Image: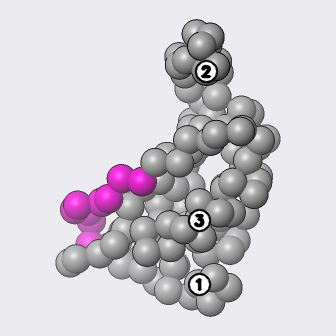
Amino acid sequence: MTTNYGIVLVTASSQTEAEAIAKVLVESKLAACVSLAPIRSIYTWKDQLCSDEEWQLMIKTDLTQFEALEAKIRQLHSYEVPEIIAIPIVAGSLDYLQWMGQTLATNSLN
């Protein structure tokens, strides 16, 4: 089964922000599912080494909708430069991929 499905990774500053973004993406049919997990990120920002607790969003989506997904994330996100990275799903459970397709196929809002 060939698909355009993928996982988009986004970090958020708090659980509240992560949940708010996730809910909007699922409700607007830009995501079939969003999994959330607390993480610690170490990175350089404006020449400063940073170490922050963040929330990772793992967004299961149809990558043909990436532009709309990215625009919605930027609209909702508090970061000046949010992480928005797409990774294609190269294989997966047929049942799960079919469920994704059914869930995302009703996306008539975007």
Q: Amino acid at mark 2?
A: Trp
Quadrant of the drawing holding the C terminus: bottom right
Check disc 3 and report its element: helix, strand or loop.
helix
Q: Could you tell me which residue is drawn at 75 percent across and 57 percent down?
A: 75
Q: Amino acid at mark 3?
A: Leu
Check disc 1 and report its element: helix, strand or loop.
loop
Q: Could you tell me which residue is drawn at 54 percent across and 68 percent down?
A: 67
Residue 47 drawn at (x, y percent): 60, 13
Note whether 93 is above or below 99 in the view shown: above
Residue 43 visible in rendering: yes
Note whether 63 is above or below 73 in the view shown: below
Query: Could you tell me how far apart the alpha carbons at marks 2 and 3 are, in whole angstroms?
Result: 24 Å
Residue 6 drawn at (x, y percent): 38, 61
Q: Amino acid at mark 1?
A: Asn
* Left or right of 55, for residue 1: left
Q: Indicate which disc, 1 or 3, sits on the residue closer to the N terminus.
A: 3
From the image, tell me which residue sits under label 3: 69
